[in-house]
């Protein structure tokens, strides 16, 4: 019997090729889209998850501002971990990270540039559940000047040699050598702390690179600090006690705990170890995945129902010759199972083909490894349940037809069935309009970020930096630095040159954050955080900053001079109303009296996701970067390449033994929005797929409607109805349904996209035309979809319709 039913199902699907194609294609697209999105969603949600990760928390600082504590940056103090462990028995252990980026390792006269490493405690391996491919986790980071390498960095440096026990140097520090004591197992990419190497924290107390920090305890928070709690600890109670704890030396700040697993998607603090993701964006993508899958199931039910009248006589005859309802249900379920099986096979093939491209699209290494499969398995049951429900509905509908009514031609569509199909199509277009709105809003926000003035001009600006491989005296290095800038100014491709410690869009780690300052009127503030960095006098003109009062510094031969320029936000922070009043006045921090020479307009140093912060720009001769502005002749890609090669040549003429790197400032600034651009693109792609699926469903319902009203159309045409009138009659219901869908979709999409926009300090408006455009687009898509079938019905010979009846 089962073989017979399978043969009948196969014949039916082959006979109705268009129906089979639409169903199989729609289901395949829905399943493939769902799997691809959920692979990415699970990847983002799996950050920093390992055995015991639920008991690991990061320590960060809250700052007292305006009588209230507000979240500070992602770092804590060097003594935060040891102090909290000693105070609270619930804390089993701690580990700290003092990170360094762009480090250059030296081995056998070979240079290995652009590495990120950190000093960390031996407890790192236990807290983060990391294993060593070589070495002992219990001793690898115990001794000073011990270094543990990642597998990839070890392979790059040593090739097939055994690295254990060999020594390395780190350029630009001193003559200290580091002994390789371990090789980390392959890095887990799903972590916010990615390191090419780790150095024992004991090294800190004798390494001259950090000699200026040896005396700091509660006045320099540059340490990522993580604690491991007892599994029975009550985290809410402990967090309250930690926030209430005020160790001696800590003023106007408090410690705060946040779950390690929440950092990647829910933390967006200054000085994050990397650019984190967005929980709201991931939630929206997950919703798109479920909507796409749901639309494909709706299509199947709608299309199956639309074919019910065509199969009515078949069902009537089968019942007359003795077929029981359970047998008919089983036959239709076998048809459904065959169709779903083919769709799933097609979806799996599509996923494997598209996964590499999708991985490049989202810039993540997605795949079907054990972690990814573990995250997808729970959804397999949901896929099976949803497919079963979608299959059972048409099976029960088709099998309940009365053979007497069918064979006498008295079968009529039930009102409930018609209403159910209306609900399906309205639901599909609620989703379509909401997704279209989301796409338009996301793209509008990205354009807004790209086009919004940031207060400076980053075009044609390149930041140069490198690591000098020789240990030269500071004075000699500074002289050569000045020589390098003079040589760069002579280049025919260079318009201006200036030194700077950082620039808009640069990493937070290159900016100093401070609490504690004395204003010109003598008032002290030890609550509000503010930022500062050092530059050369030419920096302001080069980067296009405008002065609202005063001017830039005067050039001096001194390494640093007590001159500063502040932004308007800093002036307001100090209580200044007329900007001219602060020129020539002194402010005090770092035990130095600084003279204010100018006030510049506010600019977005940290990007448009963050509000403008109070900033002080110090005059300093000793800066880590050189910023070059190309002249007007460097516009084409070819000329840019030539100019960059010229800069490289000049750099190595002055510093022959050094590394050399460059960064375009506009590209670095815009890179802050890569995650948002990826989200907008993904939203757009999967919205198009969802619309395609919804259109297929609408096509099916149109087919059903045309079959139902075939005789009516024939009679109307015989009585003189025009093609336009017939089209109007057939399409007006769809217009009403889409209007209802629009009314429901607007508040849903407004709420969802408003939540996403909350992640931006500067955001576009939710313009009325966005919703109108989404509604008009959905209506246009619907009319194009239904008009083809409606036109065929309107132009058909009415004699054929009436004779058939």
Image: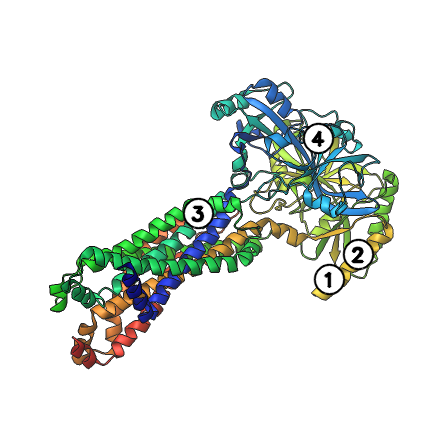
Q: Which tag, 3 or 4, sits closer to the chain's start?
A: 4
Can you identify the residue that label 3 sits on? 754
Please say if the residues under marks 3 and 4 sit with CB atoms less than 8 Å apart.
Answer: no
Note whether 619 is above or below 315 in the view shown: above
Task: For marks 2 and 4, give the one nearer the viewer.
Answer: 4
**Rendering coords of residue 154 (x, y %):** 72, 43
Q: What is the basis of the colouring in this image?
A: rainbow
Q: Residue at x 28, y 59 (%)?
A: 2
Identify the mark at residue 640; answer none if there is no mark: 1
Secondary structure at numbered mark 4: loop
Please say if the residues under marks 2 and 4 sit with CB atoms less than 8 Å apart.
Answer: no
Would residue 359 appear left or right of 797 to someone viewing this image?
Answer: right
Callout 2 crowding tier (Cα within 10 Å): few <14, some 14–19, many ≥20: many
Can you identify the residue that label 2 sits on? 647
Secondary structure at numbered mark 1: helix
**Front-most of 164 and 40?**
164
**Rendering coords of residue 179 (x, y %):** 78, 35
Q: Residue at x 72, y 66 (%)?
A: 638
**Rendering coords of residue 183 (x, y %):** 69, 39
Can you identify the residue that label 4 sits on? 141
Q: Which tag, 3 or 2, sits closer to the chain's start?
A: 2
């Amino acid at each position: 019997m089962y073989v017979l039913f399978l043969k009948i199902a196969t014949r039916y699907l082959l006979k109705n090729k268009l129906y089979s194609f639409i169903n199989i294609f729609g289901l395949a697209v829905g399943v493939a889209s769902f799997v691809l999105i959920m692979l990415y969603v699970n990847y983002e949600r799996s950050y920093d998850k390992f055995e015991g990760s639920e008991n690991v928390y990061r320590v960060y600082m809250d700052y007292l501002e305006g009588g209230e504590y507000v979240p500070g940056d992602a770092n804590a103090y060097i003594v935060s971990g040891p102090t909290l462990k000693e105070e609270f028995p619930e804390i089993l252990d701690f580990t700290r990270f003092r990170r360094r980026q762009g480090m250059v390792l030296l081995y056998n006269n070979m240079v290995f540039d652009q590495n990120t490493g950190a000093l960390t405690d031996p407890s790192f391996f236990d807290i983060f559940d990391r294993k060593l491919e070589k070495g002992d986790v219990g001793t690898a980071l115990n001794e000073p000047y011990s270094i543990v390498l990642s597998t990839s960095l070890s392979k790059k440096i040593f090739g097939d040699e055994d690295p254990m026990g060999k020594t390395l140097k780190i350029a630009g520090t001193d003559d200290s050598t580091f002994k390789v004591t371990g090789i980390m197992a392959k890095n887990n990419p799903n972590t916010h702390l990615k390191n090419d190497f780790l150095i024992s924290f004991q090294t800190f107390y004798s390494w001259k690179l950090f000699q200026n920090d040896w005396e700091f305890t509660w006045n320099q928070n540059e340490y990522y600090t993580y604690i491991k709690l007892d599994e029975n600890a009550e985290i809410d109670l402990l967090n309250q006690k930690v926030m209430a704890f005020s160790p001696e030396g800590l003023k106007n700040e408090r410690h705060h705990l946040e779950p390690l697993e929440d950092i990647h998607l829910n933390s967006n603090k200054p000085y994050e170890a990397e650019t984190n993701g967005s929980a709201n964006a991931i939630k929206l993508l997950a919703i798109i995945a479920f909507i796409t899958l749901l639309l494909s199931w709706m299509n199947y039910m709608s299309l199956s129902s639309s074919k019910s009248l065509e199969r009515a006589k078949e069902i009537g005859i089968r019942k007359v010759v003795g077929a029981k309802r359970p047998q008919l249900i089983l036959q239709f379920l076998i048809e459904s199972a065959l169709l779903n099986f083919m769709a799933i096979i097609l979806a799996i093939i599509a996923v494997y083909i598209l996964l590499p491209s999708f991985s490049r699209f989202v810039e993540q290494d997605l795949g079907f490894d054990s972690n990814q499969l573990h995250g997808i398995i729970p959804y397999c049951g949901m896929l099976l349940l949803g497919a079963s429900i979608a299959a059972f509905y048409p099976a029960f509908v088709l099998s309940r037809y009365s053979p007497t009514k069918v064979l006498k031609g008295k079968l009529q569509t039930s009102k409930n069935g018609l209403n159910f199909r209306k609900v399906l199509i309205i639901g599909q277009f609620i989703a379509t309009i909401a997704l279209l709105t989301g796409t338009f809003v996301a793209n509008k926000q990205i354009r807004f970020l790209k086009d919004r003035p940031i207060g400076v001009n980053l075009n044609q600006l390149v930041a140069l930096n490198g690591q000098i491989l020789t240990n030269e005296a500071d004075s000699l290095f500074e002289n050569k630095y000045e020589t390098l800038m003079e040589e760069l100014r002579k280049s025919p491709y260079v318009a201006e040159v200036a030194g700077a410690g950082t620039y808009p869009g640069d990493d937070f780690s290159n900016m100093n954050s401070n609490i504690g300052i004395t204003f010109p009127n003598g008032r002290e503030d030890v609550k509000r955080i503010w930022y500062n960095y050092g530059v050369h006098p030419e920096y302001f003109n080069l980067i296009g900053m405008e002065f609202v009062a005063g001017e830039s510094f005067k050039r001096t031969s001194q390494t640093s001079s007590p001159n500063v320029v502040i932004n308007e936000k800093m002036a307001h922070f100090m209580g200044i109303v007329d900007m001219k009043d602060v020129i020539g006045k002194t402010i005090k921090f770092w035990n130095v009296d600084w003279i204010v020479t100018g006030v510049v307009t506010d600019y977005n140093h940290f990007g448009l996701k963050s509000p403008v912060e109070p900033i002080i720009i110090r005059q300093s001769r000793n800066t880590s970067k050189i910023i070059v502005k190309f002249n007007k002749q460097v516009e084409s890609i070819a000329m840019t390449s030539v100019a960059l090669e010229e800069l490289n040549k000049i750099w190595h003429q002055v510093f022959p033994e050094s590394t050399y790197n460059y960064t375009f400032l506009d590209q670095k600034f815009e890179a802050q929005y890569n995650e948002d651009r990826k989200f907008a693109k993904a939203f757009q792609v999967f919205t198009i797929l969802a619309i395609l699926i919804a259109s297929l469903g609408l096509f099916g319902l149109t087919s059903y409607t045309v079959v139902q009203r075939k005789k009516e159309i024939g009679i109307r045409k015989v009585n003189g109805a025009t093609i336009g009138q017939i089209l109007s009659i057939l399409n007006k219901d769809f217009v009403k349904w889409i209007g209802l869908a629009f009314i429901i979709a607007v508040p849903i999409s407004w709420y969802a996209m408003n939540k996403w926009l909350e992640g931006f300090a500067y955001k576009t408006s939710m313009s009325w035309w966005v919703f109108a455009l989404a509604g008009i687009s959905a209506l246009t898509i619907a009319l194009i979809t239904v008009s083809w079938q409606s036109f065929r019905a309107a132009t058909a010979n009415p004699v054929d319709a009436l004779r058939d009846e």
